[in-house]
Amino acid sequence: DIIEELSELCFDLGDSLRHEKDEDKKKKMLARYLEKVTTMNKDSKCKIPDFLPGLEWINVREPLSIYRHLQGKIVILDFFTYCCINCMHVLPDLKKLEQQFPVEDGLVVIGVHSAKFTNERVTENILSAVKRYEIKHAVVNDNKEAMWQALLVHCWPTLYIIGPSGEPLLFLQGEGHYDTLRLFISLALAHYSSKGQLSSNKLGILDTEGDSIVQTDINHSILHYPGKLVISKCGTLMAIADSAHHRIIVADLKSGHILHEIGGLTPGLADGSFTAAKFFSPQGLAFFDSNILLVADTENHCIREVDLIGEKVKTIVGDGRQGRDYQGGKSGLLQQISSPWDLCIPGGDLNGKLCFIAMAGTHQLWAYFLEDTLLWKRMHKKGTCAAVVGSGREENRNNHYPMSAGLAQPSGLTYRPPNNVQQAGCIFVADSESSTIRQIDLQSGRVLGLVGGAVDVRNLFAYGDIDGTGLDVRLQHPLGVTCCSHDEKLYVTDTYNHKIKVIEPLKKSCSAVEINQELKLNEPGGLYAHGNEIYIADTNNHCIRVLNVTDNSISKFELKSKQVNMEKRSSGSIKKKFTNETIAKVNSKGGDLLVSINLELPSGTSLTKDGPSKWTVMMNDGHRMFTNENEFSLTPKWKIPVKKEDCETLAINGRVFVFISNIFRRK
């Protein structure tokens, strides 16, 4: 009864806060609410139940108890499921709150994972998501939904705040509550601190470094949770979204040699050279031509343009802030967008005119217009970005009118050219939260269902692993789809079933591709067809696979870094020349020249242990005085004897090997 009463109070509070713009007035509302709920809890002596024993925890060395470990703390329980885009949107807010209010000040965040999909109930898979999203707080796999049911939670995400004695204080549904949380946490900490009820315990059992639940070969992999990939139109380049490394890798398709590493290894938003540029969990990719690559910079809520010739990155859509607009239409940099997940530039009459965007955050398709374009009776100006499919309601609703249709976290796109049956080409959509593959007619904009889903447009739980046709098909959170010109079929990453499915569009038939049973895919996130081969981003296995559709054989695509070869100069080597114009006068008797160097390495790098780094000191006539290879230092100091009165210059050459995420690079 107390939980239900609290729910009603929170809904009323939410309505009042939404209509109030003044922060001081909001703070007064929250203060009155806190006083009321504190009195209510005191009278009822209501306490929430503790976590069940035997649950599996992540980022801690032992299971947490509300009444043992968390006594004296304000606790935010984040009820989430890791597939949910809205849950992902909450994570940056929680991270900011954790930075503003450290554990020793009294705030603790606990992720309570309450799975939607069967695949998400496995702790190993949750741990992969925790690492992929860089979650540092404790997470519990509430696979029996005990806490979810006890607190009457109904949707993802839900944030539940409890007091220092386990009393319920506040709950919020959905995303976008950062300001409310910031104000309320500040008030609650001050209130309970004044009463001496807070603990300054640092909660030393937190451990975000060592988790032995998952054993992977990640330490030997160049990639870290790759999300999507694409092949250039000329068929010579492969671009990979190395998502958890926050970078783009461009490799030679034939040899596998890495040609460019763009961005990484830490998240950020920065334009400029390939080494200066920053991304944040990029996903979708599309080649405009062989030199220009477009990137869906997902957690930066931006579209980026990569110039492979000029080796420059620039932002063309978005400003780094999550948009809450369901219409759009502004010019690129002025138009805020929300979690773009995939990109597709169609051919045919629309070739080169626009790039479709799977806007997972608003459950729509948007388009960035590369030219003035008439699309479905609406004129769009070059450089603008606008919603073109979907109302924004999370549904599995098909419709003749594209903006009246409903999508549910679209995550994969592919284009199929016109055929004899269909005069215009179409876009196929991997609609992950409805577990369906959808079809959009490019002539009319009509949205159709292809396979999966249910008759009830609001039923987003019609998932499973069943082959068949049309509505009889069951998929589980598919993230990728590609059209193969070799056999005119669609191939789908049935992500949470860890399978590749093949679809014959005219028959609406869907079946699993039978591959080597010893090779197990792990949540593949993207794929791309080239000839008779399907290139697959095997996300949780940190690699790229190649499926040959003629015999269903599958192999691993070997990325090769030229930088690993110590005998050859790598494409990533950097030569820089510095000139010091200090003049040292030397008398006829000669003397000692004191020289010191202070070399700073880029962020995220370190000196390679036992690497053949060395300094070489030469006089102006090219005479090598000495080479220093033993006990190499980044801050060497030398006393150099100078005897020649006519000596004018001294040259010091350095060869330094640095270590970057298990890749040797010589600079």
Image (spheres, grey):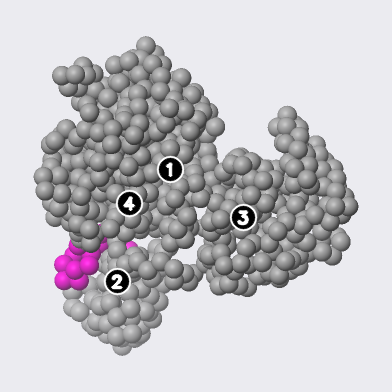
Q: Is residue 573 magenta?
A: yes
> CA–CA distance between discs 1 and 4?
23 Å
Q: Could you say where residue 494 lies in the image, as x and y percent from the top left?
A: 33, 45
Lateral position of residue 528 relative to residue 325, left or right: left
Does residue 336 lie above or below 500 as drawn? above
The residue that disc 2 covers is 657
**Residue 329 rendering spot, x and y as whole percentages:** 46, 22
User: What residue does disc 1 label?
Assistant: 298
Residue at the disc numbered 4: 498
* Mark 4 residue type: His
Residue at numbered disc 3: 146
Report the front residue among 574 and 141: 141
Residue 274 lies within the magenta run: no
Rate crowding at label 4 as few (under 14), some (14 to 19) or many (20 or more) other CA atoms within 10 Å.
some
Q: Nearer the viewer, residue 531 or 250?
A: 531
Nearer to me, 428 or 589:
428
Mark 1 or 4 closer to N-term?
Answer: 1
- Residue visible at 11% across and 48% down? 551
Pointers 4 and 3 in contact (C-beta within 8 Å): no
Q: Which residues are magenta?
A: 562-579
